[in-house]
Structure formats: structure tokens, C-alpha cells
Amino acid sequence: MDAIKLPLKHQSRLVAVVCMVVDAGFVVYDARTTGQMAVVLAMTLAVDAMLAGPARLSGWVAAAQAAVPVIILLTLGKGIDHNDAGMLIAGYRAGAWLRGAPAWAALGVLSVSLAGCSLFVGHGPVIAALVASKAAVLPWLVGRYTTARRAYLAELEKQREVDKLDAQAAVTKAITEERSAIARDLHDVIVHHVSAIGMHAGAARLGNPGSNPKLATSLLSVETASRAAMVDLRHLLDLLHGDRSEGARQPGLDNLDELLDGVRAAGTPARLLVCGPRRDIPESLDVTVYRIIQEMLTNALRHGDASGVTVTLEYAPAALTITAENTAGSGTGHSGSVRRGLVGIRNRAGMFAGTTRSGLEPDGRTWRTVVTFPLEAS
């Protein structure tokens, strides 16, 4: 039996027991003889016990409850209390659980029983109608109202869930459409330009064989960088299109050697130091750290001197620290591109509660950028 039906069954049994106790108390109190008490008590307890039965039998329970006062009145006479509480609950159950002809039939037998008994003992039609209305019609209507209200609340809950799903679907659709628009722009504009840069750099390098080794090296670096940019753009396009396959995975710390090789190919020495035992970090943080190091190296290429850049990864029990050091070129501290690069680093770090520090060291020449990410203690 499931978790919903079990409490309902317990409650129906409790209602039946309370009705049996209440009705039995009035029978014992009002009975004139022991024989009368035994007969009325037996019938009352029997029909009240039926209230613990399944809801589909509510019509038969109402008929049995309606029969008791008629039988008592015809055999034992008037003036003996019987199953008043049971009839109230039977009327409520019939209104709450039955529909159509069975519901109206249950209301009819209860009303006829109450009104008929009232007329039989000498009350007028008005009193008989009031008795039937109070003890049969009113409980029946309350049962109908309770069921209707429950159905209304269930419908509201269902509608709320439907609205919630529709809202989520609308948001998902809007995000998908926006991603598709961004993907089209990347493909139609950025990918085209980056591809053209690589092609022209390759053509220039091949068109001037051996004329200028430094120029050839620089052109080769442009080709390499453009190819790397194309790979990253393809990854971004796959992600924007919802492709989460392994081929669409963005670069992370495992790709740092390729990143450093690209910087070295551009003529700038690049060194990587790893301190502490390396540990696994979430994939999203792994990609973010890679992008931050990429921005650090880009800043060093643009604004550092020929001495190169050193990147340090320091793994601590509860933190990961990335430090980049390079000798600053002239005018580095206030250039707009440096500020934009640092803002990008700071924004990426902030998404993972990371902190960023950057600026010239006391020697006035060394530029240091430090980013620290908190990690779960290992």
C-alpha cells in the first residue's frame, strides 16, 4: 500500500471508532431496558463500523445508516438515541466520494429516513425538512464542496507545473536561439578572418624563402597561433551548438604545453613551474585556469620584454594559485589593453570565488599577476 492510501485508511478507521464511541455512549445513556440497549447498540456499532470500509461502498453504508432509525422506530418505539453521528459521516462520505446517481440516491435515502422518522414521531413537515437538511443535506454538501475544492487546488498545482515547464522551455529556447546566433556570427565572421590570417601568413612565409629568418619565424608563429585559434573557435562552436562530446571539450591544464609552445614560437621564452602535488579540479575550473594563463601569456607577449615570462602553478591543500611574472616593457602599467586583460582575468576568477592581485613589484620592473582559487581541502 502506498504512502498516500495508508494514512487515509488509518483516518477512516479512526473516524469509525469515534462514531462508534459517541453513538454507543448515547445509546447506553438513553436506553430504557437492557434488552433495548443491547439491540440498538448492536445495530449502531455494526453500521458505524462500516464507515471504515472503502469509499466505493459509501452508498451502501448510507443505506445501512438510514435503515437503523427506521427499524428502531418501528420495533422499539421512539425516544431512543441511535446512530446520529454515523449518519452525519455517512452523508459526508456520500457527497465526497460518490458521483452521479449513486450520490443522489445516498442523499435521498438519508433524507427520507430522517424526515420520515421525524414525521412518524409527530413533528410537522417543516421540522422534518429541517432535520433532513441538517443531518443529511448539509453533510452531503460539505462533502461535495471538499472534493471540489481539492480538485480545484490539484488543478491549480497542475497548471502551475505546466506554466513552470513552459517558462523553462521558453528560456531554453531563447538561450538556444541566442547561442545559434552567436555561433553563426563566429562562423561567418571570426572564423573567416582567422582563417584568412593563417592563409596569408603561410603564403607570405612560403613566398619569401630564406630572405629573413626572423620574419619567417614570426610568420610561422602567426600561422600556429591562427590554427590554435581556429581549434578554440571550433570548440566554442561545438559547445554553442550543444555538442558535449569529447571532441568538443575545451582546452584545460593538460594543454598548457601547447600554449607555452605557441608563446615560445613567437620568440618569447615561457617557463612553467608546478609546486605541490597536482590534484584533480572541476572541469569548469580547469578551463577557466587555462584561459587565465592564456591571458597572462598574451599580456606578457604584448607588454613584456624579451626576457620572457614565468608561470607558476602552486597546489596547496585548500587553494590553487597561479602566478605570472615578466619584466614589464615601457608604459605597461597604464595601457588600456593591460587593463582589459586584467579585467577579464578578474571576472573569470570571480566566477569561482577567486581573488586577483596584479601590479609592479618594488623593483619597478617586474610585473606580477597572482590569482588564487579556493579548493576543498584534500
Image: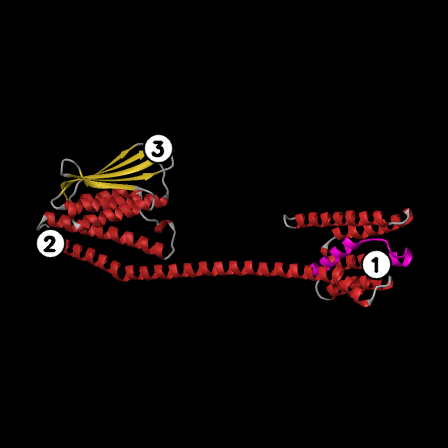
Gap in angstroms between the C-alphas marked 3 and 2:
53 Å
For marks 3 and 2, give the one nearer the viewer: 3
Q: Which residue is mark 2?
A: 208
Which amino acid does the dot numbered 3 rest on?
Pro
Q: Which mark is residue 104?
A: none
> Which residue is depicted at the point 29% across and 48% down?
347
Question: What's the distance in space between the residues labelled 3 and 1, CA to CA?
Answer: 81 Å
Tell me if label 3 and label 2 are in contact, CB under 8 Å. Answer: no
The image position of residue 90, as x and y in percent, is 75, 57
Question: Residue 72: within the magenta?
Answer: yes
Horizontal side, residue 244 vs residue 11: left or right: left
The quarter of the picture where residue 146 lies is: bottom right
Horizontally, is 134 left or right of 222 in the view? right
Residue drawn at 15 percent across, 51 percent down: 219
Q: Earlier in the sequence, mark 3 or mark 2?
A: 2
Instruction: Specify the principal SS of the magenta part.
Output: helix
The answer to whether residue 270 shows anywhere in this view is no
Of the residues shown, which amino acid type is indicated by label 1?
A: Ala
Q: CA distance from mark 1 to mark 2?
A: 113 Å
Q: Earlier in the sequence, mark 1 or mark 2?
A: 1
- From this view, report whether residue 369 is shown above or below residue 243: above
- Mark 3 crowd level (few <14, some 14–19, many ≥20, 10 Å Cα): few
Of badges 3 and 1, the one in the foreground is 1
**Image x and y of residue 246, in percent:** 37, 49
SS label for mark 3: loop
Q: Nearer the viewer, residue 364 or 301?
A: 364
* Amino acid identity at mark 2: Asn
Residue under label 1: 67
- Residue numbers of the magenta segment: 68-97
Where, quadrant-wise, is the C terminus in this rendering?
top left
For label 3, the residue is 317
